Image (cartoon, grey):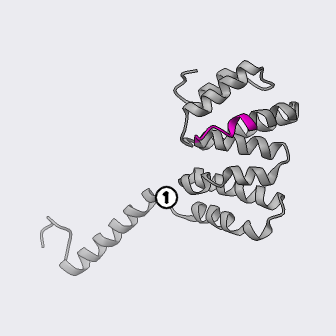
Amino acid sequence: MNIASLELGLLLLGDPPYSDAQAAELVDLVTAHAALNSIAGLTRLEHQAAAMASGDPAAALELAARLESVHSDTGCWLRAALLEASGRFAEAAGAMRFLREKAAGEERAMVMLASARNLFAAGHYDRVWYPLAEACNRAHRRAPCAMPPVCWRKRAKRRNRLFGGAPGSPS
């Protein structure tokens, strides 16, 4: 399956349950889309994993075992989501271990929250705090584009106060 976006590929694949051929297409799709591109794609994968696990838990675990050899970020995320939906929280947290350091931005916050959720559900309370703090840290930061206009206005006011007017204005 040569699809430009993960979301489009998932839409074309349809809803679970999947046949063996569709499961192979799903593995190919997550292998082809190595990077965690969007929150929408990750959320869609998470929902599909939950639907697969609720419909046929054995098939979901079989797909998770198949995805163990896939080393793409998207494949790791789907594997972790399948394990989480199947109630194997410690294994899901282990599958996310590599994603925690590779992801950036909103995707990192989502991975950290999922990692904290799985660690908590697995009973590893002492290890929950780091991913939870990292997720909050990412969510709390200001957007980079919100900062410069404020700085420019402050700089212009200071320049006008020190040098008596805006550049190019008659003094």
Residue annotated with mark 1: 143
Magenta segment, which residues? Answer: 65-72
Q: Is residue 36 rendered to the left or right of residue 155?
A: right
Residue shown at 59%/54% (left/top)?
Answer: 108
Q: Percent position (x, y) of residue 144?
A: 44, 59
**Residue flagged by tag 1: what amino acid is it?**
Ala
Q: Check the picture and name the quadrant holding the N terminus.
A: top right
Q: Percent position (x, y) of residue 36?
A: 57, 43
- Location of residue 17 by image quarter: top right
Residue shown at 69%/57% (left/top)?
Answer: 113
The residue closer to the viewer here, 143 or 7, is 7
- Location of residue 40 by image quarter: top right
Question: Is the residue 159 above or below the residue 50 in the image?
Answer: below
The residue closer to the viewer here, 109 or 103, is 103
Q: Percent position (x, y) of residue 159?
A: 24, 75
Question: Residue placed farthest to the front in the image?
Answer: 69
